[in-house]
Image (cartoon, rainbow, N blue to C red):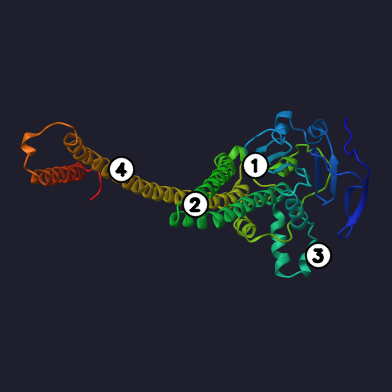
Amino acid sequence: MARDVLAETETTSVDGGVGMLVKKKGTASARSWILIDSDVNETIMDIDKYAIMHRVQIHARDLRILDPLLSYPSTILGRERAIVLNLEHIKAIITAEEVLLRDPTDDNVIPVVEELRRRLPVVNANHAELGGQHDVEAGEEDESPFEFRALEVFLEAICSFHAARTTELETDAYPALDELTSKISSRNLDRVRKLKSAMTRLTARVQKVRDELERLLDDDDDMADLYLSRKLSSGSPVSGSGAASWFVGSPTIGSKISRASRASVMTVHGDENDVEELEMLLEAYFMQIDGTLNKLTSLREYIDDTEDYINIQLDNHRNQLIQLELFLSSGTVCMSIYALVTGIFGMNIPYTWNDDHGYMFKWVVILSGAFSAILFLLIVFYARFKGLVGS
């Protein structure tokens, strides 16, 4: 059996006796995990995959989904004793009694850990009686099982992450597109190209999360697999250490809306075929991620409209160049005829009709020039008649 903790550790008391196991030396490696149990005790571990598989009773193929070296799409899988969750940088395993979260020192994961600490303390029933309306509301929310509380934190984190990235992209993209329409330059074109590439990548990531939530909402059996506490209450054994459940003390507005609509729907011990509680939870965040995707779609349409406008402008410039080239070519042809006449009369050939007729030079110049000009005008009128140039 691999050791759960590879570095020296110590236990500290945080927030009224909550134990936390932290490292005394060294930093968390790429294989480090943070474990948060139902008593809000935190443990940072360097643990191999075999120890995790034994602890939460999942297969290697499920754990492989959480490997950061492998590119797996966003996935939420319900297993007999655990929920395997891969939402980009959030890679976690949820059981009915504890949460295992990978790479807790990652910059994107640190806010998620802090949110778990803030949102999942144990709410004392006596404290709820003395705490006013807010604690009464928290007491009503205690019906939600432990795994749903953890799942909601992760869903809110990934939806908020994508919403923030989308807002940043909109802030940069719209001014850049407006600047490009006012001035077409290589610098502005390159800037918009980079923003479009970033938008395409972000859209693909948001689409994967949306598709996964939609897949769960469309399959009641998959949603039923996520009711770990229900399986525990019906007699199915659940591995791991910990106690009852987590309770939310300070939910966000989005979670208040989703929970208020499902507060009286069911409890953990309800009908095994009833998935309405989870369905309400998933629908709330499906709507949020779908709204983010709609913003990206609107941005894509704005970019496409800008590209169409730029193409029209470029076509106009191209037509102007074609007209200029046609005028220059027509002028060259006409002047070639004039030069031909000049060349013929410049040859050392005797012309008897030129003797004592000096005025003929003037008429030759006038007639050849007029012929060249008339030919040039005919070419231009023909080009306009055929639509080769604009009016």
Q: Nearer the viewer, residue 196 or 223?
A: 196
Density class for disc 3 (Cα within 10 Å; few <14, some 14-19, many ≥20) is few
Q: Nearer the viewer, mark 2 or mark 3?
A: 2
Q: CA distance from mark 1 to mark 2?
A: 43 Å
Q: Residue at x 27, y 42 (%)?
A: 326
Density class for disc 2 (Cα within 10 Å; few <14, some 14-19, many ≥20) is some
Check contact, mark 2 vs mark 3: CB within 8 A: no
Q: CA distance from mark 2 to mark 3?
A: 51 Å
Give the answer, above or below, for where 187 lies relative to 73: below
Give the secondary structure at mark 1.
loop
Q: The N terminus appears in which quarter of the rendering?
A: top right
Q: Nearer the viewer, mark 1 or mark 3?
A: 3
Of callouts 1 and 2, the N-terminal one: 1
Q: CA distance from mark 4 to mark 2?
A: 39 Å
Residue pointed to by mark 1: 272
Where residue 175 sits: x, y (%)? 51, 58
Q: On residue 126, which mark appears?
A: 3
Give the secondary structure at mark 3.
helix
Of callouts 4 and 2, the N-terminal one: 2
Give the secondary structure at mark 4.
helix
Where residue 109 sits: x, y (%)? 73, 48
Amino acid type, callout 4:
Glu
Amino acid type, callout 3:
Asn
Q: On residue 325, which mark appears?
A: 4
Check contact, mark 4 vs mark 1: CB within 8 A: no
Q: Residue at x 76, y 54 (%)?
A: 114
Q: CA distance from mark 4 to mark 3?
A: 89 Å
Amino acid type, callout 2:
Leu
Of callouts 1 and 3, the N-terminal one: 3
Where residue 318 sits: x, y (%)? 35, 45
Q: Nearer the viewer, mark 1 or mark 2?
A: 2
